Amino acid sequence: MKLFNHNKNYRQDRIAMRIAARRGMTYEYKRARKSGLNPIEALEDWDLLTPGDYALFYSQS
């Protein structure tokens, strides 16, 4: 189960980094992750997520 959770976080981190990079906020994203926020929470702090972005996190591909 731990491996599955790691893979999920890794996948979500990659998606979130691309979203943060679109706005030039990768540094801020990384700091939020280091403070303990999950990828979605880290992006929500700056209202960087669109409804389409949420779909990326929950798709099974």
Image (cartoon, rainbow, N blue to C red):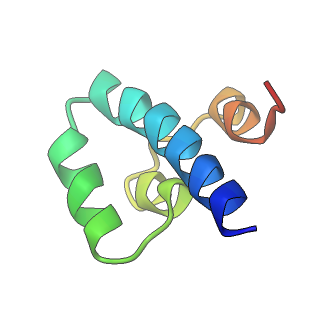
Locate residue 60 relative to residue 54 in the image: left or right. right
Find the residue positioned furthest to the left.
27
Asked if 60 appears above or below 44 in the picture, the reply is above
Asked if 27 appears above or below 4 in the picture, the reply is above
User: What residue do we see at 29% from left, 76% from top?
Assistant: 35
Asked if 31 appears above or below 18 in the picture, the reply is below
In the picture, which quadrant includes the N terminus?
Answer: bottom right
Q: Percent position (x, y) of residue 55?
A: 76, 33
Q: Percent position (x, y) of residue 11?
A: 57, 39
Find the residue positioned furthest to the bottom.
36
Locate residue 49 relative to residue 18 in the image: left or right. right
User: What residue do we see at 37% from left, 53% from top?
Assistant: 46
User: What residue do we see at 41% from left, 62% from top?
Assistant: 45
Find the residue positioned furthest to the right.
60
Front-lying residue, 21 or 5: 5
Q: Percent position (x, y) of residue 44?
A: 49, 56
